[in-house]
Amino acid sequence: MKKFLLLSFISLYLVSCRINKIDSSYYKLNENIDFKIVRLIDGRKRTASNQTVYTANEDFRYKQAHIKIRNNHEEKQGFDLSHLYLVDKYNRKHKVSRVMKNLQFQTNSSMVNTEKKLGGKKQGLYIVDFTPAFPKDELVLKIAIDTSDSEALSENARIISLVTE
């Protein structure tokens, strides 16, 4: 009887679990540049922008993404990540606050600049910090490309689901 109960609890637990995996396909940032989210990191208590360090409140955390950018054109192309947003469960946008290239630690203002260039037919890995902070236990399921200035998503926003089940 004990084995049956134990087996029942284990099977119920396994059925109730859900494994989420970040979708690893490329998406269009513009006509020549594609991107994909390689990794999404939760739980950063601090982030920096314009040589200022910001600390999140006790129940909030900053998100960081590792984004692979691919240039599909033969010539050097510029791209701007200022229209790329993480989207919370209330459809509020969280903007890019800092961009670093290829895991290089930089202390100058170029890491805050969201406009970058990438050589012809090349790809690069960028670390991107997002602000404002998310609630501590909230999962990010969507990313959006939106050119409007409002806090909420506009009707023209392209919404991309990050999670595959």
Image (spheres, rainbow, N blue to C red):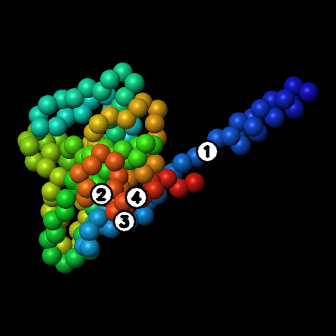
Q: Position of residue 163 (x, y in %)?
A: 49, 53
Q: Residues within 10 Å of mark 3 (few under 14, many from 20)?
A: some
The numbered mark, 3 or 2, whose residue comes first in the sequence reads 3
Quarter of the rendering containing residue 154: bottom left
Could you tell me how far apart the alpha carbons at marks 3 and 2 are, in whole angstroms?
Answer: 14 Å
Q: Residues within 10 Å of mark 2 (few under 14, many from 20)?
A: many
Could you tell me how far apart the alpha carbons at marks 4 and 1 are, in whole angstroms?
Answer: 22 Å
The numbered mark, 4 or 1, whose residue comes first in the sequence reads 1
Question: Dot 4 corresponds to which residue?
Answer: 159
- Asked if residue 113 is positioned above or below residue 73 in the image, the reply reads above
What's the mark number on residue 161?
A: none
Question: Dot 2 corresponds to which residue?
Answer: 146
Question: Dot 1 corresponds to which residue?
Answer: 18
Q: Position of residue 88 (x, y in %)?
A: 41, 43
The residue drawn where x is 26% and y is 26% is 55
Q: Quadrant of the N terminus?
A: top right
Could you tell me how far apart the alpha carbons at marks 2 and 4 are, in whole angstroms?
Answer: 8 Å
Q: Quadrant of the C terminus?
A: bottom right
**Element assignment for label 1:** loop
Q: Nearer the viewer, mark 3 or mark 2?
A: 2
